[in-house]
Amino acid sequence: MFAILENSLPSLKESFPNSNSDIFYSAFYDINKTVISDLIFEDGLRPDGRKPGEMRTLSCEVGLHAPLHGSALFQRGQTQVLCTVALDSIESSLKNDYMSTLTGGIKEKNFFLHYEFPSYATNEISRSFVAGRRELGHGALAEKALMPLIPKNYPFTIRLTSEVLESNGSSSMATVCGGSLALMDAGVDIKSPAAGVAIGLISRKHDSNEEEHTLLLDIIGQEDYVGNMDFKIAGTSEGITALQLDVKIPGLSFDIIKAATSLGLEGIKAVLKTMNSCLSHPKIDKSNLPKIDTITVPINKRSKFIGPSGYNIRRITTNTGVRITPGDSEDTWNIFAHNSEALDEATDLINNSLKEEKEIEFTFGALYKVNVLETNASGIKVQIDPAYPLVYIPNSQLTSNKISHSSAAGIKEGQELLVKCYGRDPVTGNLRLSRKALTVAQSAAVKSISSSSKRRYNHHLTRSFKLAFQAQIPMMLIKWWLIVDQLDHSCKTAP
């Protein structure tokens, strides 16, 4: 259509050199609209030979590429759309902040639709840098039409990509049709397949200023160019999920809106009939769909499961490609795998790392000899048994005094210590050992012995002075007797 104008412009500019090019475009639009309107109203035919209520030829196909989770190719006339689905972990979903939630009304979103309209879809060549207004608007409309179909609390994040391979009108509604098929091909249990059509309006004025209108089902680009309305309707067999109305006239009557809606619903039913003949229910027997599982790890084995600085989890995820995230409770973990083989491999690695070994029992309150293998600023690591992991003793349990380094307690690597066992920590499950408990008890016992010895010596001293005074013994003999008695007492109390 526009090729005729481009070919005619040079000769028109040569014939009318003083005229503006906008005049030629405006005249071309008026002539084009008059010719199409007369064709529709007088002959009942549209530019492509269809009747006003007739839809273009439909075709659809699913399962185009086996490695994809879901794929579909939908074609309506000269509009062709390729839709693909990729399922990912629920952790990949969009989580908005509080301000975005208040303004947008969406707290968490696990369904995304990426609409791509490359230049070759309309037989053009250009460089595409970012998504333009067309991509953003049409993608938002198609996503809004498919969003109500996604089941609540779906365990995966869904990314639906729609690439327009060829376009001649209503590519956004073709995205709704192809997206529904791709979701069902991916095994997504949607409530019902959805489809979409575009309704157009052609008007013509008579000499008496009266207007007559005709509605067009499934309009093409030329009809959208000369028409007065582009009414997009998307929905299922049970109702409408999305609407969009573009008008070029001041207003529409209620009768036109009512008739356009009824015509759109009839078109949706016709498209759904063709789609159901291709795929009517979500697939449930696909082998390449991702898998999820929840495992329970006891709290006392959590450190062994995670590993030092998360080494064990990183090793499992690197070797198998799975994703491990914390669950709803402290002892549960979620595993996301791209297939069942990866999930089985990851489960085996986890079970081997948490395999039950012969549990070494330690008695609460008992004394154990340990070897110091490592000292640092915050404490020491000791070995209580060769078959048991190293036990950490903080500085607060080494001595009763406050120290800033374990060496201040006189402890060196390779030294043998006597410690007291206080069972396992109720939170971490780690074994608790204490050296301070023994040092405090020993110092208390020494203090008690010293106090008793001092009281006994004072008693002997007082008694000796009394006897010497009564017997009138010289003071020199009393001094020698006290020294001998003190030496005898020291020998008896020595360890």
Image (spheres, grey):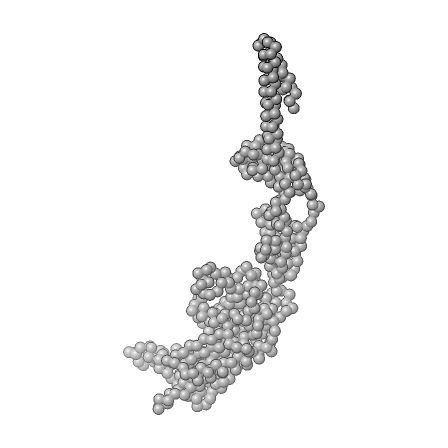
Q: How many marks?
A: 0
For residue 368, above or below residue 45: above
Which residue appears at 45% of the width and 90% of the height? 43
Residue most extreme to the left: 18
Residue most extreme to the front: 470
- Could you tell me if residue 31 is visible in this image? yes
Residue 418: image x %, image y %? 64, 34
Which residue appears at 41% of the width and 88% of the height? 212
Position of the N terminus by quadrant:
bottom left
For residue 200, above or below residue 331: below
Which residue appears at 56% of the width and 37% of the height? 395
For residue 6, above or below residue 374: below
Residue 425: image x %, image y %? 61, 45
Position of the C terminus by quadrant:
top right
Q: Is residue 185 left or right of residue 32?
A: right
Residue 198: image x %, image y %? 48, 78
Q: Quadrant of residue 133?
A: bottom left
Front-lying residue, 437 or 8: 437
Front-lying residue, 358 or 473: 473
Residue 431: image x %, image y %? 63, 43
- Could you tell me if residue 49 is visible in this image? no
